Image (spheres, rainbow, N blue to C red):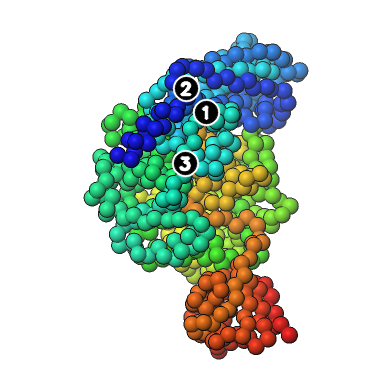
Amino acid sequence: MKTKLFFVLMMIHVPFLFAGTVVKTFSFGHYKIESRGAYQTFCFDNTLQCGIPGEPLLPWQAVVLMLPPGEAACSIQVVYEDETLVPGQFRVEPKQHVRPATEDKPGEFLLNARVYRQHRVYKVPASGPLLTQYLNGFALGLSSFTPVRYNPGEKRLAYYKKVTVVITTRPDARSAEALTRLATAENVVSRVKSFVMNPGMVSTYPVRKSSQSNYQYLIISPAIFKDEFRQLTNMYEAKGISTRIVTVDSISTCGTGYDLAEKIRNFVIGQYQLYGIEYLLLAGSPPLIPARGFYCEVLSGGSVYVDAGIPADLYYSALDGNFDLNGNQIYAEVQDAPDLLPDIAVGRFTVNDTAELHHMIHKSVSYQTNPVFGESGKPLLAGEYLWAAPLTFGGSYLDLLVNNRNDNGYFTHGIPSTTSLIDKLYDTLIAPPYNTWQWSQAMLLEKINQGNSFIHHLGHANSSYMMRLNYAQITNSNFSAVDGITHNYQLCYTQGCDCGAFDNGCIAAKAVSIDNFLAAGIFNSRYGWFDEGTTEGPSEHLQREFVGAMYNDTVPEKHIGAAHMISKIKKAPWVGLPGEFEQGAQRWCHYDCNLFGDPAMEIWTTEPATFSAATWTGSIDSNWNNSGNWNPPVVPTTLSDLTIPVAPHLPVITTVNKTFGHNVTILSGGNLTINTGKSMVVFGNVTLAP
Ligand SMILES: [Ca+2]
Ligand SMILES: [Ca+2]
């Protein structure tokens, strides 16, 4: 009943219920020409190089325009003006195949000679396809165009200095329905505004008042886990993120939907609609919490790759439509008008039992509240040899994650080399054509056990193999120093194939659910894709945008699930391109790239700088880890500055539980006893006051 009432109220406030137009003018002037061998690429800032394999790569501009509330895009017109010839002659590089990151067989250099012989302007569509998508209730029109014209026979390039895009809109039932899920929390609106090219349109949308009963973080777990989250929820409540735990069993009994996955998604939509939730944790591997399998096909190198069951938690993250518009129980087909813009941040604990669940909870809490000092800005980049002809190395791709980059025509923020200690382990060419040096497992394990913040990896992988390690090698003893005390737990992002196939007991699920090693990571449940012979590729796009969100110099996104969500929002305009441009691979990656971990986890990219003070009261007993003995009541962490004055009971460390502190000041009359064989970790100073 509440839902219906809200819908009626919203409709009354919708200011536009007639067809209209949304107009945006783009200017092009400063271009960049890069040479690769005998060929050149021609780029403008914030464009993407797209093309048909073997035919010229041209820079395409994304169009992301907010539409009036309750309306959808029905047509697009692109007006090109001020054509300008670029001085000189150019052989524009042809698009190469996109490849799954499992294959390393030699390829061939693709060149469509017939196209390159033509003495006329190479034909391109006036615009890419026009989609209406929804982000947190706001309707967005997505499309693309290229301002460049190329005559291959004459080797002449020209571009239009001024391009005007006109999108015609009309009232639409799906847009009206999306409005019922409008979220207008400050951080959500700011994210939406940063993504659209006409942020002023936001003011035409109604404002949704936040309610007292709002909460931010929903945890869905099987009933057997429901009492196990106290450590996690206590931490988030202390951070001001309120939580709610709901069991799959109760959703299964009371929910509505075709199957359990749809019942869970419908429940999530309801909670989002009523309470404006921002984070969702799915606490269990399938079958504890089912995966929705998505459909995608990719044309690559003359082969068609098809998968109708790509495990995709985007299903629970993107909350518009039902991913099966044609009702054939094949999900996320192009004709299903799938929601490409995630509305909430989703992560999954890939666990099968309570012991694994405890490990993931402990690692998430310990990573955030007890960071080990001196390693927050120490990422490790591990790149492998990828492809023989044209020769392709993962390291060249990973280099694009460092510093702000404009490569391949589009801009992303990166890991600042001046303030970070970046370690690299790259396969390299010893002698042409294919004699390469390759790093070993032992070298990687040594580096990981020396302490890192974040492992970025690009190399070959499968469901039981990643980073040159096999499933049996993911053990606590192989990562003995990554125990949260000697070195902090680490995070990982890999573009490798299948290592995140969480429907099938994959290696990445093991890496996050053992005691040591990874606290969270982003992994592909099926293939990752790269473009051979370049530093481009669909998986690379997502990883660059993920890192870009973390290191954005105006509003860095610290929550790992939100950074993952932003990477997909940024790439969504490129998913809708017709098959001949990206051949379906960007869509594939949009579907199969999932977060294993706590979506609200805050990532350390710099050393901790904020500490909270607490004073020992000893009002209960001498137990250091009893929050009742501290004012304010806390269990001390490596982020706590602690004072121990005279007290009824003075602290004695007797427990096997680890004890932590940042600065510890012992006042006159105070005392701290550490019993024989027990220990305490202090990263700051211990001061004895006179
Ligand atoms: Ca379908
Ligand atoms: Ca959406």
Going from the N terminus, do you reach mark 3 or mark 1 first? 1
Image coordinates of residue 218 in percent, x first then y, are 40, 52
- The crowd level at tag 3 (other Cα within 10 Å; few <14, some 14-19, many 20+) is few
Confirm whether residue 109 shows in the render. Answer: no
Quadrant for the N terminus in the image = top left
The answer as to whether callout 2 falls within 8 Å of ligand 2 is no
* Residue denoted by label 2: 16
Q: Nearer the viewer, residue 299 or 245?
A: 245
Confirm whether residue 217 shows in the render. Answer: yes
The Cα atoms of the two marked residues, 3 and 1, are separated by 16 Å
Identify the image quadrant of residue 680: bottom right
Image coordinates of residue 503 in percent, x first then y, are 35, 50
* Residue denoted by label 3: 209
Residue visible at 57% across and 51% down? Answer: 558
Residue visible at 49% across and 66% down? Answer: 516
Q: Nearer the viewer, residue 302 or 326?
A: 326
* Residue denoted by label 1: 204
The answer as to whether callout 3 falls within 8 Å of ligand 2 is no
- Tell me the element at label 2: loop
